[in-house]
Amino acid sequence: MSSPMSASSFLKALKDEGLTVVQVGDWRTHNRDDKGPWGPVHGVMIHHTATRGTDRTVQICRDGHAGLPGPLCHGVIAKDGRVHLVGHGRANHAGLGDDDVLRAVIAEKRLPSDNEANTDGNRHFYGFECENLGDGEDPWPAVQLEAIERAAAAICRHHRWGAPSVIGHREWQPGKVDPAGFTMDSLRERIHDRLK
């Protein structure tokens, strides 16, 4: 069980992992903590945005939309590899997911199939939205994939977690498909190698 990093520790961890970080507005205090606690944290969740254009993507992830207030993640990983921090604290990114998956993440075991939506993921995961249409055709530049790897590894390194603590939204919540365009197993392999 881990307490969430402070905003300063989060920023430092990302920079120490070699990432270029863009701080967006009041990201340190922008959260949904009034809807419930953030933590204990157990892992990192990766998403794709289904949007085009970095500026628009960052704005949507920071502000949310009529049906879902922002922040919609903690950081937006752009196609150029920059990480835009938009929130710190509880964020509307994970929603309800499978308690069996959460137990597997905590134990760092093989993930079961997600067939339930009975557990609050916003409380237990850091979330990164990655700029991509998610249509299987929009490319994932190498610099972006490396930034996803580095961002997840930075959090794992801080909490002394292994790569199995990093999951995709599609592995958490039934019906979700993100991130589409690469496998989470390949990402976890890269994170594992980075953490060695």
Image (cartoon, helix red, strand yellow):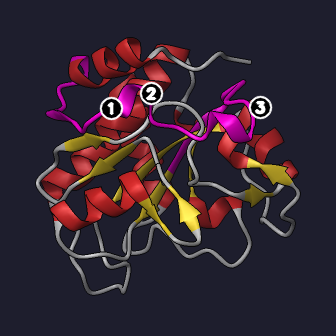
Q: Is residue 23 magenta?
A: yes
Residue 194 visible, this orientation: yes
Between the residue at mark 2 and the residue at mark 1, the CA separation in whole angstroms equals: 6 Å
Magenta-drawn segment: 16-45
Label 1 crowding class (10 Å Cα cut-off): few <14, some 14-19, many 20+?
A: few
Between the residue at mark 3 and the residue at mark 1, the CA separation in whole angstroms equals: 34 Å
Q: Mark 2 highlights which residue? A: 29
Q: Is residue 180 above or below residue 39?
A: below
Tags 3 and 1 touching, CB below 8 Å? no
Query: Which sits earlier in the primary sequence, circle 2 or circle 3?
Result: 2
- Residue 39 found in image quarter: top right
- Residue placed at 78% from the left, 65% from the top? 114
- Residue 96 found in image quarter: bottom right
Position in image of residue 175 (x %, y %) = 69, 79
Position in image of residue 8 (x %, y %) = 36, 13
- Residue placed at 24% from the left, 81% from the top? 138
Q: Is residue 140 above or below residue 91?
A: below
Image side of residue 116 versus residue 24, left or right? right
- Residue placed at 47% from the left, 49% from the top? 71
**Residue 107 tag number:** 3
Query: Which sits earlier in the primary sequence, circle 3 or circle 1?
Result: 1
Residue 193 visible, this orientation: no
Q: Mark 1 highlights which residue? A: 26
Label 2 crowding class (10 Å Cα cut-off): few <14, some 14-19, many 20+?
A: few
The residue type indicated by label 3 comes to Ala
